[in-house]
Image (spheres, grey):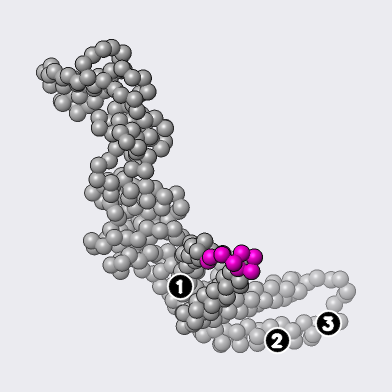
Amino acid sequence: MDTSSLMLALQLQQQDLNLWELSKKGKQREGEVTDSDLAFEACRHELELMTAQISDQVMALSVARAVESDGQLIREAQLAEEQAAKDHEYAVRLSKDPNATTRSGAEKGKKVQRVDDDDENDLIDVLRSMNLGGFDYSMSDQPESSSWASSRKPPQTRECIACNDRFPPLALSQTPCSHDYCRECLVGLVRSSLQDETLFPPRCCGQNIPIKKSRWFSPELVGQFQAKKLEFETPDRTYCSVPSCSTFVPPAFISGDSATCPKCSRRTCIHYEREGTTELGTTVVVVTDARNAAMSFLTISSSAPSAMSWLAGDVDITVFETAVV
């Protein structure tokens, strides 16, 4: 049953209820409430609720269709309003300072615009999805007839390429290769790529999956992705020499031969990846176990040579005299 026919049926039922209410006036004692009165009020409430629900759905579909057909025109009008506001702000600033420029305001506007665009795209997806399938007019706590149920179109669903479960279109994210992922599988794919460099960046059918702030990815996950992207794209990586930390040190935290850990603030020599010291003349003994691929550090104060090494079985021991770092 289409929306117009359904609204007409509801209006006819409401008219019948109004006529029944007029016909029963004066036929019972004042203040008396019968079972038929209770049934009448319950029926009226259900009709009003369903009418309001359908009216809201019609309005939402109208907005969704407007976004679908006139989205570009709406966006252009919005950009024109934003530009007019920026021009007015610049004119006010210019009247106070003849040397004022629009650079800072423009840069700020670009950042805000990028955030607004992401949020707007999510909203457009939500509105567009409302135009994909039928609307369930049945009441959650009331049974429906078989003829009513058969008249309703089944909701549209699509399959997640990873788990093979079916979801409404709104609950799926489409990758550049046109495959659909549910939120759980998509987030799991990203997290796996953060743990295994061979899986980074996350991709499907050989095409990279864009990772940006949206309803699919939390700001924390996007931040972790950007951090790993910086780490995996750095050719000669330096890690914190503290075994309990071992955090990647970005190039921005390296000055000369010393790298400062952004997590624990300890300093590491970038040549030997050992902990730095400020005491001149301190000797660091680096012990490398070739069998277990393990490295340990022993700091002592002595007048040992600046560098000497000897081999004892499979254990290679090298002594370095530190400089001020």
Which kind of residue does numbered mark 2 sit on? Gln
Pair 2/3: label in front: 2
Q: Amino acid at mark 1?
A: Ser
Q: In this figure, which residue is indicated by the disc labeled 2?
A: 15
Q: Nearer the viewer, residue 75 or 91?
A: 91
Residue 61, visible in the rendered structure = no
Which quarter of the rendering shows the C terminus?
top left
Q: Few, some or many C-alpha atoms within 10 Å of disc 1 (few <14, some 14-19, many ≥20)?
A: some
Residue 25's tag is 3
**As drawn, 62 above or below 243:** below
Q: Is residue 193 above or below residue 172?
A: above
Q: Nearer the viewer, mark 2 or mark 1?
A: 1
Helix or strand or loop: what does disc 3 sit on?
loop
Name the kind of residue labelled 3 in the image.
Lys
- Asked if residue 193 shows in the view, the reply is yes
Q: Circles 1 and 3: CB distance less than 8 Å?
A: no
